[in-house]
Amino acid sequence: MAETSAEQIALLEARVSELPERLQAHIERARMLGRELSPLFSADPERVDIALAGHDLYRAASDVEMLGIADRRGIVLGALEIQQPLLLHGPLAAIWMADEGHVSDKEVLDAVQYHTTFAPGLGPLAATVFIADKIDPNKVERRPWLSKVVERAYIGDWKAAVRTYIKTLDGELRRQGVAPHPLAQEAYDYLGDT
Ligand SMILES: [Fe+2]
Ligand SMILES: [Fe+2]
């Protein structure tokens, strides 16, 4: 039988309660931002909340742990995931939510899977999750340029907010000699065409 949203949230919160406290605090802040942004982006706040409650279930897992789970799950790893196993934390959270959290809503699972990079074809629900995660005040303090993303988000323009994030991060990564993720670039181009 399909679980209700409240039952799904209860399962997720039980799992979140096992995470390090600073991560629990980030998840709580992201959920609050998700509640604020949902009406601005015309996204369903309940589905946004489920996605944000589960998005970082593997954020504190070690590289070895994530690579091990991915291997057991038969996930084919690209060069990028082998170099940066942290990229797996969204996909692994989506798998946990589908299997253990009884979440079958594909848009919610996609929002979790792609919350690090975004991806072409995603809509307002995933954008709300993506931006709520990125504009955690602690992150804005570390990266002052995120205030540009906050500004666009509170105007209610989720496409501009996502594109501004991707473009500015792209510049930051290039200055550090790090290659931007191809999915982010594809999402940026996709949103520019829509
Ligand atoms: Fe994350
Ligand atoms: Fe997060």
Image: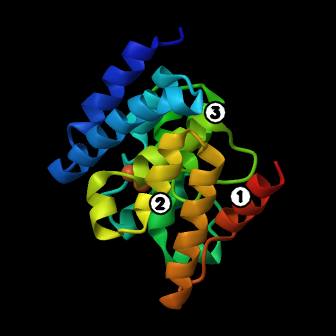
> Residues at badges 3 and 2 in contact (C-beta under 8 Å)?
no
| In this view, 135 is above or below 35 | below
Image point 57% across, 33% down: which residue?
41
> Residues at badges 2 and 1 in contact (C-beta under 8 Å)?
no
Taking the view exactly as shown, the residue that stands out farthest to the top is 1
Q: Residues within 10 Å of mark 3 (few under 14, many from 20)?
A: some
Q: Position of residue 112 (x, y in %)?
A: 52, 43
Image point 60% across, 82% down: which residue?
179
Task: Calculate the distance from the C-alpha at mark 3 to the C-alpha at mark 2.
Answer: 27 Å
> Is residue 92 among the parts visible in the rendering?
no
> Residues at badges 3 and 1 in contact (C-beta under 8 Å)?
no
Q: Which residue matches tag 3?
A: 107
Q: Which residue matches tag 1?
A: 187
Image point 75% across, 46% down: which residue?
121
> Is residue 107 among the parts visible in the rendering?
yes
Residue 4 is tagged as none
Please state which of the two labelled residues, at mark 2 or mark 1, is closer to the viewer: 2
Q: Nearer the viewer, residue 106 or 140?
A: 140
* 42 sits left or right of 37 in the view: right
Q: Is mark 2 within 8 Å of ligand 2?
A: no
Q: Amino acid at mark 1?
A: Ala
Q: Secondary structure at mark 3?
A: helix
Q: Amino acid at mark 3?
A: Glu
Q: Is mark 1 within 8 Å of ligand 1?
A: no
Q: Secondary structure at mark 1?
A: helix
Q: Which residue matches tag 2?
A: 148
